[in-house]
Amino acid sequence: MMWASVTDKVIGDKIQGIVNEGAKRLVNLEQIEKDMLTLIQERQASGASFVPWSSIDLGRGYCGFCVLFGILDKANPDDGWDLIGHTYMQEIQKIIMKDGISEFGLWSGLAGIVVAARSLSRNGQRYKHFMHELNTCFINSFPNMMAYMESKLEEGPSLHEFDVIQGMSGIGRYVLCFIEQQPMRQALEQILSYMVKLCEDRSYKGLDVPGWLVSYDRYYGHDREDYPNGHFNCGMSHGIPGVLALMAIALMKGVEVAGQREAMDKIATWLMKWKEHDVYGPLWPARVSWEENQKGTLTYVVPREAWCYGSPGVGRALWLSGTVLHNHQWKELALDTYRGTARRPEEKWHIESDTFCHGRAGLLQMVQRMYAESGDELIGQLRDRLLVQVLERWQPDAPYGYQEKEDGAIQNIAGLLDGAAGVFTVLAGIMQEEDPEWDMIFLIS
């Protein structure tokens, strides 16, 4: 895909300085683990929600840092970032030997570990045996996993079965990296066929609804309180846009199964049905409740300019689909979505964090993609404005320089998904002359 790196020398020097300083704070894996465990203990003690620590996951664990060190190694192969990354890979291997791998997900399992090794592999020349072993493990276990996933379609899926973080959308993106291997290509075709089935209508409470509806008994936590009769998830991280994005990217790579194009059209048409507008541009809800689906109208949509939930993630999925299916309407709607973000006052963005998942770094990366591929002037201006904002939010006195903010609480997190490593990776990638491709793990490329 096309790329549009930053060429301004003053901005470039500032980026380089922040990335170098920030990355140096991430070389001590023992300290990172200690900080995360302390944060979890503090949140537990205060009764706040928390994400359990897993040292080898892609989101907050060691695998995520390998993605950063890999992109730094690509830009400066003589600076020793590959050796730092190798230290992390050695620790990951030790943990696997001791504890094994409990799941296959991209952000919390085997898929993420392979992505980490691939990031440091210098175009596949390193960690060959390690990646081969894990891919073989995946292929050997795949039939049972696929049979289980398909059996769940009859009762209705849970989010973690088809989403980007733990489910088949994320796993499929990992598999797509290895489609030159016939077993992996066949696995991807089965994943795509599963997604086609996911998009088939099924009966629920006496009505025929899209198969990605998640019923009350298939999720937990606040969603049970807020959506007692089920909901349709519209977030890129956990919802149907991630499925649409994978099918589009697979088609771009030449992988297609029966019904794939029709399923893409169904998802895109459904998303367009639930589009709202404010005075600035298109908006999408985080979720559509069962009650809203019955009425055919939304109660209220709050703008949110984030990757995990919000209009930019939906817009990106529509852009990818419109590009590969040559659907001008979808592409134009995607551009209008990002133009809306550019026009919308920042106090209406509803993002507070510096980080990728639901912060400015993630928005910057998506805007960078859209600007590089469209050349749209207003989106380019938004890219430049966001870049300055991210640079200005650097806090040298903070442990990792950038911070996560959730439910009003500031958290110092090092990791890739919702920590400082994700910000540094975005900044480092923007400086590269060619498409760095690392953001494939977010299914935006």
Image (cartoon, rainbow, N blue to C red):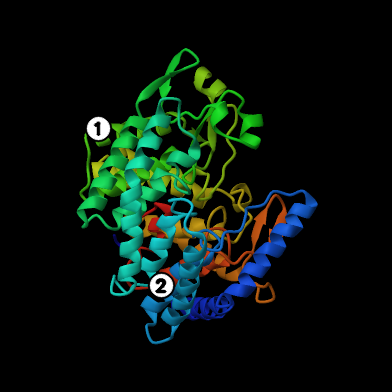
Asked whether the viewer can see residue 400, the reply is no
**Of 179 and 56, which appears nearest the observer?**
56
What secondary structure is marked by label 2?
helix
**Of 392 and 251, which appears nearest the observer?**
251
Give the spatial CA distance, label 2 vs label 1: 37 Å
- The residue under label 1 is 259
Please tell me whether residue 314 is drawn above or below residue 291 in the rendered image.
Answer: below
What secondary structure is marked by label 1?
loop
Place of residue 13 in the rendered image (x, y in percent of width and height, measured from the top left): 49, 81
Please tell me whether residue 282 is drawn above or below residue 382 in the rendered image.
Answer: above
Place of residue 100 in the rendered image (x, y in percent of width and height, measured from the top left): 48, 59
Identify the residue shown where x is 40% and y is 78%. 73
Which amino acid type corresponds to the residue marked 1 in the rendered image?
Answer: Gly
CB within 8 Å, label 2 to label 1: no
Asked whether the viewer can see residue 237, the reply is yes
Residue neighbourhood size for the residue with mark 2, other residues' Cα within 10 Å, grouped as few (<14), some (14–19), many (≥20): many
**Of 185 and 239, which appears nearest the observer?**
185
Which amino acid type corresponds to the residue marked 2 in the rendered image?
Answer: Ile
Q: Is residue 263 left or right of residue 312?
A: left
Q: Quadrant of the N terminus?
A: bottom left
Q: Quadrant of the C terminus?
A: bottom left
Among the two numbered marks 2 and 1 on one chain, the one whose residue lies closer to the N terminus: 2
Number of callouts: 2
Identify the residue shown where x is 32% and y is 38%. 329
Residue neighbourhood size for the residue with mark 1, other residues' Cα within 10 Å, grouped as few (<14), some (14–19), many (≥20): some
Identify the residue shown where x is 47% and y is 47%. 166
